[in-house]
Amino acid sequence: MSVTPRTIDFGRQHGLSSESQLITVSNTGRAVLTFSAYANEPWIVIDNGTGPLGANEEGSFSVSVNVADMPVGSYKGEVTVSSQQEKRKKSPLQLLWRGPGMI
């Protein structure tokens, strides 16, 4: 299993939620692989973050951020993609978000 991209930067946030960014999961094996994606922070929103992939197939899910109750600042979070078939292999992704006026 491979996951791309490895880092997502949402840049400066001007609203309460962001544009979604796609994460691609590739099954590099010969058997069906079922993946699951989960986040370590409640402000990270994952859509369609689970599914089966046939041999040599690719799939994707979207990630966005919801910062409605967060003060302005810089934040880091992580999305992990795992699969039972690959002995719970974890592929962490780094997410960066900076509030309005942050560099």
Image (cartoon, rainbow, N blue to C red):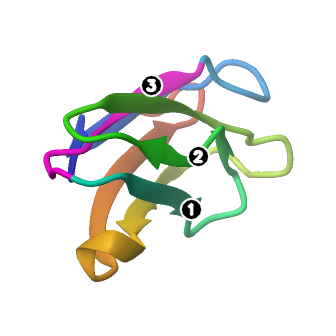
Residue 24 counted in the magenta span: yes
Mark 2 lies on residue: 49
Q: CA distance from mark 1 to mark 3?
A: 14 Å
Describe residue 42's horizontal placement relative to residue 26 as left or right. Answer: right
Q: Nearer the viewer, mark 2 or mark 3?
A: 2
At 38% from the left and 67% from the top, the residue drawn is 83
Q: Earlier in the sequence, mark 1 or mark 2?
A: 1
The percent coordinates of residue 71 (x first, y second) are: 73, 51
Q: Secondary structure at mark 2?
A: loop
The percent coordinates of residue 54 (x first, y second) are: 34, 40
The percent coordinates of residue 102 (x first, y second) are: 47, 33
At 67% from the left and 18% from the top, the residue drawn is 14
Q: Which mark is residue 22?
A: 3
At 84% from the left and 41% from the top, the residue drawn is 68
Q: Start and end of the magenta stretch?
A: 20-30
**Farthest residue toward the right?**
69
Instruction: Verify CB contact (< 8 Å) between mark 1 and mark 2.
Output: yes
- As displayed, is residue 68 above or below residue 22? below
